[in-house]
Amino acid sequence: MNGANIPESWDDRDMEANVEDLAELSVSAKPFVPNVNASSFVPTFRMKPAAPAPQAEAETPQPPTPVEPSNEDSVAECENGDTHPKEVVVEQNEPEPPVEEAPAPVEEATAPVEETPAPVAEPVESTVPVVPQEPLTIADHLNMVFIGHVDAGKSTLGGQIMYLTGMVDKRTLDKYEREAREKNRETWYLSWALDTNQEERDKGKTVEVGRAFFRTKTKQFTILDAPGHRSFVPNMIGGTSQADIAVLVISARRGEFETGFERGGQTREHAVLAKVSGVTHLIVLINKMDDSTVNWKEERYNECKKKLTPFLSKIGFSKNITFMPCSGFTGANLKEGQPKNHPYYTGMPLIPFLDSLPTIKRDPNAPLRMPIIDRYKDMGVIVLGKLESGTITKLQQLVLQPNKRKVKVATILRNEVEVDMAVAGENVKLRLDGIEDDEISKGFVLCSPDKLCSSSALFDAQITIIQYKSIITSGFKAIMHLHSCVEEVTIEKLICEIDRKTKERKRLVLPCAKQEQTIIARLRTSGAVCVETFKNFPKMARLAIRDENITIAIGIVLKIVEE
């Protein structure tokens, strides 16, 4: 096909002419195969100015004889009438090796640049100090409960501690402060770190036990923020039953301390319930020392301390008790002391003091015991509780007492993080397989299949009546709190009276009991409950008896009666 016959438009030609042109095509021609290794085409007008520069630079150390041609060569070039092509061939073919060698000096020049990234390793080394979070041992975990009268500042203290230990950032607190200011509750924003319920935030009263955690240098703590109102004492007992240490928060403000400590206040009852729950150490925080009615005065601090000491010694806190002044709202004497405000107190601030507490010995190889404090349904059955003894692992087979249901641990959550194992002393959430949520009640206990905990509806207990206006006889009914179990109980029989000084039985026939007496009675519950004797497992053998929203008696289980 001749290119001269191409028309301006293919529409101008008829079909016959197109067929004649197509007939000239060779259908047997070889297919076109591109040479991918061919060098790229470079026009001479682009190569000529660039070539002399590298040649001059590359040949400067060499003699210039090859560059300057002789007279004969120049005449031959003129006779051919082609001056440039010969020069181009000489200049372009000879400099090709220098062009290939040109990248070499560039690499040598850039070699120092490649060595410069060595300082990049510095940021990696700088991250090493962040890693010092070594795994905590079994004894490094402590559960701490805040107790005390309503409006003593327990939730504010908990929120301030979380902020000082880095568990709540400044941005979150600023958000809480703005929201609290909109509701004219400027001083409540710290408590919102623990009071996550909207009803609790609106009323400023803790209803459920708030949960949070923080870490010190050597320990990890779980905060249990117990409600202070008398209507929610049953919830407070459930939180205290999980605690290892208790922080009794006292308001130093004029009038508030007296209201909480006198008859009708919750300071006394909370302290008694903490002792019954088996708390090993009590810290008394004299809070709100920055109040305008106090102004960090030593007289007010000593006054509160003087009134509290005899009562706390009477209920059994004569040892392992510590007093310290503080301000939960400002954070004074929580992480760092302020000697200018409290020169009369030279002890450690709260957080360093907590870090210095002795560890609690726990046996991870003991039979597993985990009382259930709550359960709900969320993509399966979730139960909450404190692991009192033993070790739980993922996919472990357990038995739920007292209904003897076999379950499998599908997931273990510790501080909202999924883990493969939990040890004694930790508060955890478990997702269980093989059971429905309506088959679990508060007070049930997860146990090892090879060694179940005891369950019975009849047992003998040693009871001390701390306050009751009338007398107690056989047939008396009340509400019993046993670890996380809340059950109606009936005193079936008064067995004998115990001398509180000699601890011996002195009256074998006991028609009735009254206040300040210690007796042994046979108790019967409406149904079987998980219970252990004080000798075998003290944590599951402590009980409190309440009537008309008042704690009237405390005691321990001595014997489980078989029927």
Image (tube, rainbow, N blue to C red):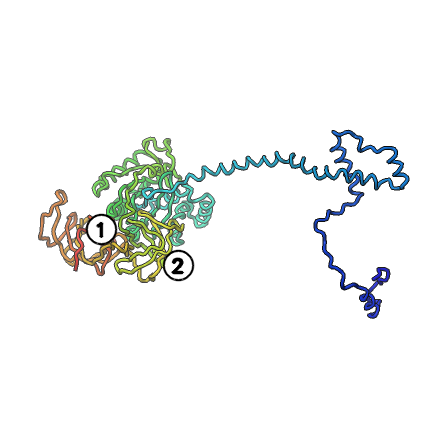
Q: Which residue is more in the foreground, 283 or 8? A: 8
Residue at (70% x, 49% y) in the render:
37
Q: Residue 182's x, y, as percent?
A: 46, 49
Q: Which residue is more in the foreground, 310 or 33? A: 33
Q: Residue 197's x, y, as percent?
A: 39, 53
Would residue 406 be found to the left or right of residue 556 on screen?
Answer: right
Q: Are marks 2 and 1 in contact (CB under 8 Å)?
A: no
Amino acid, disc 2: Asp
Q: Say whether residue 259 is visible.
A: no
Q: Residues within 10 Å of mark 1 (few under 14, many from 20)?
A: many
Q: Residues within 10 Å of mark 2 (few under 14, many from 20)?
A: few
Q: Residue 322's x, y, as percent?
A: 28, 37
Q: Which residue is more in the foreground, 365 or 539? A: 365
350 vs 511: above or below: above
Quadrant where the N terminus sits is bottom right
Corner quadrant of residue 46: top right
Amino acid, disc 1: Ala
Q: Residue 223's x, y, as percent?
A: 35, 46
Residue at (19% x, 49% y) in the render:
467
User: Distance of mark 2 from mark 1, alpha carbons?
Assistant: 32 Å
Local secondary structure at mark 1: loop
Corner quadrant of residue 99: top right
Quadrant where the C terminus sits is bottom left
Q: How many marks?
A: 2
Local secondary structure at mark 2: loop
Residue 274's label in the rendered image is none
Would residue 270 be found to the left or right of residue 509 on screen?
Answer: right
- The residue at which mark 2 appears reads as 378
Residue at (73% x, 59% y) in the render:
31
Q: Say whether residue 213 is visible.
A: yes
- The residue at which mark 1 appears reads as 541
Q: Earlier in the sequence, mark 2 or mark 1?
A: 2
